[in-house]
Image (spheres, rainbow, N blue to C red):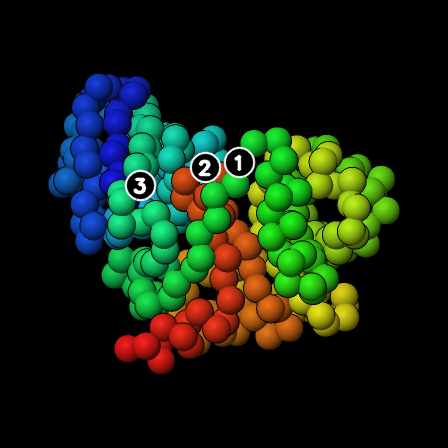
Amino acid sequence: MRVMLECVAGPHAGRQLEGQPGRVIQFGRSGADWPIPEDEFLSRRHFEVSCEIGACWLRDLNSSNGTRVNGRRVQETALRDKDRIEAGESGFVVQVTDLEEDKELTVDLARPRSRAASDLRSTRLMVDGEEASRALVEVLRRKSEPVYALVDAAQDPRILPLLKESGDRFQALRRNLALHLVELSANSPLLDTLPRPGGVYLTSTAAFADLKHHLGRLPHSRTLGDYLRTCTPDEYRQCFGPVRRYLAEGAQPGSWLEFEPEQLEAQRAGR
């Protein structure tokens, strides 16, 4: 995986910098790896980008004016191809390119300088186009287990009305939370009508209420796909419980990662 950061707005527009695995790049007005003293709206150390093989993270360094990714103010988030970073009056575009060694198996990579589990592995699926949602769910249906989706209604105002019209069972994970658990019926209209494939799909044979309770207790249920790629082995196991497998978006467009508890145990046994 190769990550290129290109400045597209502000005093340094046109400059590029490549992120290397294991490297942490700080951006800011001064004292940073990429200093931009001309941008007076940047903090001295504003944000940093951390790169590993297969993963790239942005973390705001408690800046005064904040850091935005695709228009949303963030504290910490995974970066994907074509993401746009805005800080002060400067803007950057992320360019992610897969290398040959990434194609068959994506290693779930450690968040730099954290205790994340670098030994987790996930099977990569490449799915794209208008039929993406249906194709993804068909992959899970082959396991002969009920299929669910975690859908964030805050991402698009059309989502909640579509859930109500679908006839599929759904509930918010917690009160006043936009994240909903949806039980996808065999011919769910949501596979064709949701604005875009996204969020997280999962399979489970547990009762709906038990599954909802389990998912609602997870500390990172809104960003569960990113959490599965960066958590420790113990945290990884705790994410499953009644869940048999997860399917979450990868860093590349059309890339999805399938997580199973056995993947961690199989890799450990093969050491």
Q: Label 3 is placed on what type of residue? A: Asp
Residue 209 placement: quadrant: bottom right
At x 67% / y 56%, what residue is drawn?
141
Image point (75%, 56%), residue name: 183
Mark 3, residues whose alpha carbon is within 10 Å: few (<14), some, or many (≥20)?
Answer: some
Write down the residue under mark 2: 253
Q: In the rendered image of this protein, does residue 185 appear above or below residue 4?
A: below
Residue 98, label in figure: 3
Q: Earlier in the sequence, mark 2 or mark 1?
A: 1
Q: Distance between the residues labelled 2 and 1?
A: 8 Å
Q: Which of marks 2 and 3 is nearer the N terminus?
A: 3
Q: On the rendered image, what quadrant is the C terminus found in? A: bottom left
Image marks 2 and 3: residues in contact by CB distance under 8 Å:
no
Crowd band around label 2 with a 10 angstrom C-alpha radius: few (<14), some (14–19), many (20+): some
Measuring 44% from the left and 47% from the top, which residue is drawn there?
250
Q: Provide residue 216's location: percent of width, then percent of height.
A: 64, 64
For residue 177, say whether it is visible: no
Is disc 2 in contact with disc 1, using a CB cutoff of under 8 Å?
yes
Q: Where is residue 259 in the image (x, y as percent from the top left)?
A: 50, 62
Residue type highlighted by circle 2:
Pro
